[in-house]
Image: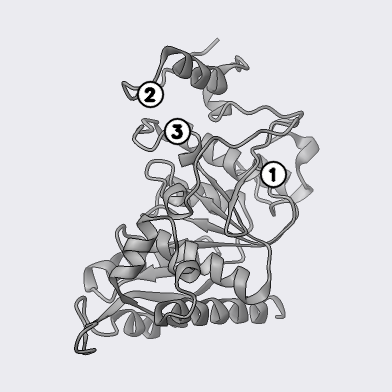
């Protein structure tokens, strides 16, 4: 039997019973390779069983490619990506999801695909481990009417996940295919920064209906935003548009606007690349402070200018998706 050695750190406050419980969760089923079941779930059929694959998926596997399929009972799946960290992508994901749910009464879910730096639990004010169905599927946690799944629900907030690529890819596969979402109209996947293993695994395994690129107007952020957009184009994922975050700062006293990170950089980049610009969200302390409290501004201040910005972007996003589906 091959053994996979995993380095896992637990905070000092963890009791031996808690550590044992987590270890049991991850390795209780004694699979030949622990990486095959990174989250310690079980199911009647393995994720790549021929009984679960369409002929097209089997053909992909025969060519050495992972099985690519639509997620069960979910009408549309999109990603929110940035290429670069620190541009407010996760905050944007949460507020767009809540805006869509509010605008159209759609059933919405968010999947946090950042295994190493999950922020969804804090942004959505959710804590605790998800329950598991009899079939070994994780049951999402819910707040503000939106279903959520994140690696942050499976580990403590200050516990690092120290995994190599194989474990990351297997954990992603389980988060993609072993979560019981029920019926959803839209699932939004919050991508981590970059164009690496996570992005490739998701685009190879799931039929994405599109991707929203988030960037600030700053040139250094736009360089990576271009790379991210080009990666999704290369793998055949439609680009819904670019959303410009932190576009300007509006002084609360004199009401003068200042373009701290540059002026309309994302708009120019979108035009150069032939991509739609979905809209702007200004820089404001309320967005940051409320996000840290787990009270997204779309919920906490529904009549604010910033909420209207998110609503307008969500409406354009939905219109673009509907137009694409009709062609």
Contact check, label 1 and label 3, Cβ < 8 Å: no
Q: Residue at x 48, y 62 (%)?
A: 94
Q: In the rendered view of the protein, which quadrant contains the N terminus?
A: top right
Contact check, label 2 and label 3, Cβ < 8 Å: no
- The number of discs equals 3
- Mark 1 / mark 3, whichever is N-terminal: 3
- Mark 1 / mark 2, whichever is N-terminal: 2
Residue 201: in sight, yes or no?
yes
- Asked if 248 appears above or below 288 in the picture, the reply is below
> Which residue carries the number 1 mark?
180
Contact check, label 1 and label 2, Cβ < 8 Å: no
Q: Residue 152, position in %: x, y?
A: 46, 41
Q: Is residue 254 left or right of residue 188?
A: left
Q: How many angstroms separate mark 1 from mark 2 (CA)?
A: 27 Å
Which residue is nearer to you in this view: 160 or 146?
Answer: 146
Q: Residue at x 42, y 17 (%)?
A: 5
- Asked if 130 appears above or below 286 in the picture, the reply is above
- Label for residue 124? none
> Which residue carries the number 3 mark?
155
Q: Secondary structure at mark 1?
A: loop
> Which residue carries the number 2 mark?
8
Q: Is residue 259 left or right of residue 142?
A: left
Which quadrant of the view contains residue 47?
top right
Q: Secondary structure at mark 3?
A: loop
| Number of residues whose C-alpha sits closer than 10 Å to that of mark 2, classed few (under 14), some (14–19) or many (20 or more) | few
Q: Residue 35, position in %: x, y?
A: 52, 26
Q: In the rendered view of the protein, which quadrant contains the C terminus?
A: bottom right
Q: Residue 235, position in %: x, y?
A: 52, 60
By what rule are the colours in the image chosen?
Answer: one colour
């Amino acid at each position: 039997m091959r053994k996979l050695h995993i380095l896992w750190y637990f905070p000092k406050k963890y009791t031996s019973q808690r550590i044992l419980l987590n270890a049991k969760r991850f390795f209780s089923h004694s699979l030949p390779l622990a990486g095959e079941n990174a989250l310690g779930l079980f199911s009647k059929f393995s994720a790549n069983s021929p009984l679960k694959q369409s002929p097209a998926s089997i053909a992909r596997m025969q060519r050495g490619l992972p099985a690519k399929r639509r997620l069960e009972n979910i009408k549309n799946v999109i990603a929110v990506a940035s290429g670069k960290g620190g541009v407010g992508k996760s905050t944007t994901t949460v507020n767009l999801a809540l805006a869509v749910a509010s605008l159209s009464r759609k059933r919405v879910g968010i999947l946090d695909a950042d295994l190493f730096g999950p922020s969804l639990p804090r942004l959505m004010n959710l804590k605790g481990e998800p329950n598991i169905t009899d079939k070994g599927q994780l049951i999402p946690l819910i707040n503000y009417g939106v279903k959520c799944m994140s690696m942050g629900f499976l580990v403590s907030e200050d516990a690092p996940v120290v995994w190599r690529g194989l474990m990351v890819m297997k954990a992603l596969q389980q988060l993609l295919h072993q979560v019981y979402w029920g019926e959803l109209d839209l699932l939004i996947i919050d991508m981590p920064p970059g164009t690496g293993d996570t992005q490739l695994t998701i685009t190879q395994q799931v039929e994405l209906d599109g991707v929203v690129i988030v960037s600030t107007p700053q040139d250094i952020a736009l360089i990576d935003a271009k790379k991210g957009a080009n990666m999704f184009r290369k793998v055949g994922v439609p680009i819904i548009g670019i959303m410009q975050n932190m576009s300007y700062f509006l002084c609360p006293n004199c009401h003068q606007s200042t373009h701290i990170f540059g002026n309309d950089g994302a708009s120019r980049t979108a035009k150069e690349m032939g991509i739609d610009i979905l809209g702007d969200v200004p820089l404001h302390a309320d967005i940051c402070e409320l996000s840290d409290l787990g009270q997204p501004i779309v919920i906490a201040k529904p009549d604010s200018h910033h909420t209207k910005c998110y609503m307008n972007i969500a409406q354009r996003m939905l219109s673009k998706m509907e137009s694409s589906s009709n062609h």
